[in-house]
């Protein structure tokens, strides 16, 4: 403590930061031991939209370092509490997917550093996902993690729009965070691709939209609608056509499954009419035909040719670009997409790299993530949360049809929250179906199973 005070009194920024870190360390350790979902998992969730801006020399990014700490904290909590949930189907399927991806190294076209890094990324994301899927969670912690998702996304959207409106992140009319660049024609290491930036906002936008629809008070609706519009504005500024299509699919899914159809329908109609006056949206879509979707159509044509050669076992994880180059000459491209291009499509990428076997496992795993939250009981206290997360899954899948998102943290964040929520629903179901005596004894023996307000109900009371 004395040393921390001394560092603060040095007056330098480094001394101030180190001093505050030393002071906060005991509190951080206590929270990490008692409530790891709040910290460090909550911090990890907040940092995800900023991931590419947080590079550190030896660990990749700060987000990755926090993810490692999160996995260790969650594992320690589970061992200390001796509370582990049963292994569920999505965890098994994603595990099979990782094993098959690793197996393809046996016949891969090239065991490049990129391919090895791709496998390492998948394994790390899966381990954190699996750890979180195995622990019970309270409504309070579930609510906290949702708030962290929204807070991080809102901060990222506000930051991006600030740079965009001040001309510091406006490249070709698109919001492109490119810190440290010497000119608008150069790319720095600290940059966020506009498509990835917009895709990272899909999950929080689905949550804020559901909060807006379920809010009972006027000021609550105003607050949540403002946050939803902020996120949507950032997506529009990014110019990501895939993410805008994903938003449309999320809204369509809400119209189909949510209990707020009559409230949402007039908003959708007014939004569709209003979009006609936002020319940047339709300009981006109007150029899709002339540019072949920024060259994606040509890439997909070559990718399909490559798939014909590697359809069964695949070309190996991380080898789409090598397979693409081998098929490049044999396909006529009206719009030349050039050599060594990524798939820009999760299905085509998996089909070429992992074959039909890997693609089948991938699709079953995505579908299993969706089905684990399926409920037809609109009176269930978790129904709104389930619909919001299912909508985010649908939107994320649609966006992944135009990008390579399986290695991105924001995609696995949707999977993690889905499993945490499914685990909480299963816990509450066991309590509600038990007898009065068994429920009381269970609550006393296991406080994490105690009935509490759901995340939606808790946020409504906050309003």
Image (spheres, rainbow, N blue to C red):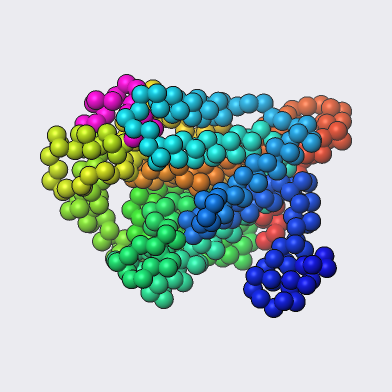
Residue at image position (31%, 43%) is 342
Q: Quadrant of the N terminus?
A: bottom right
The image quarter containing residue 285 is: bottom left
Name which quarter of the figure residue 271 lies in.
Answer: bottom left
Task: Give yes or no for residue 234 being in the magenta stretch.
Answer: no
Q: Is residue 207 above or below residue 417?
A: below
Dominant SS type (magenta): loop
In this view, the residue in front, 351 or 253, is: 351
- Vertical position of residue 410 compared to residue 239: above or below: above
* Residue at the (33%, 71%) spot, across then down: 183
Q: Is 107 displayed left or right of 7 in the figure?
A: left
Instruction: Name the spot of residue 284 as percent of width and height, x first.
Output: 27, 58
Q: Nearer the viewer, residue 454 or 94?
A: 94
**In the image, which residues are magenta?**
304-319
User: Is residue 377 among what the camera can see?
Assistant: no
Image: 449 above or below 22: above
- Could you say where residue 282 lies in the image, as x and y percent from the top left? 28, 59
Q: Is residue 310 magenta?
A: yes
**What is the x, y in percent for residue 311?**
29, 24
The image quarter containing residue 425 is: top right
Q: Split into 4 quadrants, where in the image is the C terminus? A: bottom right
Viewer-side residue, 62 vs 239: 62
Q: How many marks?
A: 0
Asked if 154 appears above or below 433 in the picture, the reply is: below
Query: Do we see residue 357 in this rendering?
Result: yes
Q: Residue at x 31, y 36 (%)?
A: 320
């Amino acid at each position: 403590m004395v040393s921390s005070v001394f560092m603060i009194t040095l007056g330098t920024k480094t001394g101030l930061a180190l001093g505050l870190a030393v002071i906060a360390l005991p509190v951080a350790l206590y929270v990490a031991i008692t409530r790891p979902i709040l910290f460090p998992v909550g911090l990890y969730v907040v940092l995800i939209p900023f991931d590419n801006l947080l590079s550190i020399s030896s660990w990749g990014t700060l987000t990755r370092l926090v993810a490692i700490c999160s996995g260790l904290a969650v594992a320690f909590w589970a061992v200390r509490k001796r509370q582990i949930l049963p292994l569920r189907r999505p965890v098994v399927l994603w595990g099979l997917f990782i094993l098959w991806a690793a197996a393809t190294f046996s016949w891969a076209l090239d065991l490049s550093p990129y391919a090895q890094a791709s496998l390492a990324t998948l394994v790390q994301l899966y381990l954190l996902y699996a750890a979180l899927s195995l622990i019970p969670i309270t409504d309070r912690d579930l609510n906290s993690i949702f708030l962290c998702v929204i807070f991080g996304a809102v901060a990222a959207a506000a930051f991006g729009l600030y740079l965009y409106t001040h001309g510091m992140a406006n490249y070709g009319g698109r919001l492109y965070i490119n810190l440290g660049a010497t000119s608008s024609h150069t790319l720095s290491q600290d940059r966020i691709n506009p498509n990835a930036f917009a895709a990272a906002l899909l999950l929080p936008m689905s949550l804020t939209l559901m909060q807006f629809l379920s809010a009972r008070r006027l000021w609550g609706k105003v607050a949540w609608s403002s946050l939803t519009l902020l996120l949507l504005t950032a997506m529009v500024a990014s110019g990501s056509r895939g993410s805008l299509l994903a938003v449309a699919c999320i809204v369509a899914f809400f119209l189909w499954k949510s209990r707020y159809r009559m409230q949402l329908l007039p908003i959708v109609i007014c939004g569709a009419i209003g979009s006609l006056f936002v020319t940047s949206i339709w300009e981006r879509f109007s150029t899709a035909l002339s540019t072949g979707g920024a060259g994606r159509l040509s890439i997909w044509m070559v990718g399909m040719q490559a798939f014909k050669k590697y359809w069964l076992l695949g070309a190996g994880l991380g080898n789409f670009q090598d397979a693409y180059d081998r098929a490049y000459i044999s396909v006529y491209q009206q719009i030349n997409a050039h050599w060594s291009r990524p798939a820009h499509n999760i299905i085509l990428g998996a089909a070429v790299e992992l074959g039909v076997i890997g693609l089948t496992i991938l699709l079953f795993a995505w579908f299993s993530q969706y089905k684990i939250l399926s409920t037809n009981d609109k009176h269930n206290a978790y129904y709104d949360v389930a619909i919001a997360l299912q909508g985010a899954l649908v939107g994320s899948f649609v966006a992944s049809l135009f990008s390579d998102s399986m290695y991105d943290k924001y995609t696995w964040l949707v999977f993690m929250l889905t499993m945490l929520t499914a685990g909480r629903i299963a816990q509450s179901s066991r309590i509600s179906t038990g007898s009065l005596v068994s429920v009381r004894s269970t609550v006393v023996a296991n406080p994490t199973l105690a009935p509490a307000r759901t995340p939606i109900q808790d946020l409504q009371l906050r309003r």
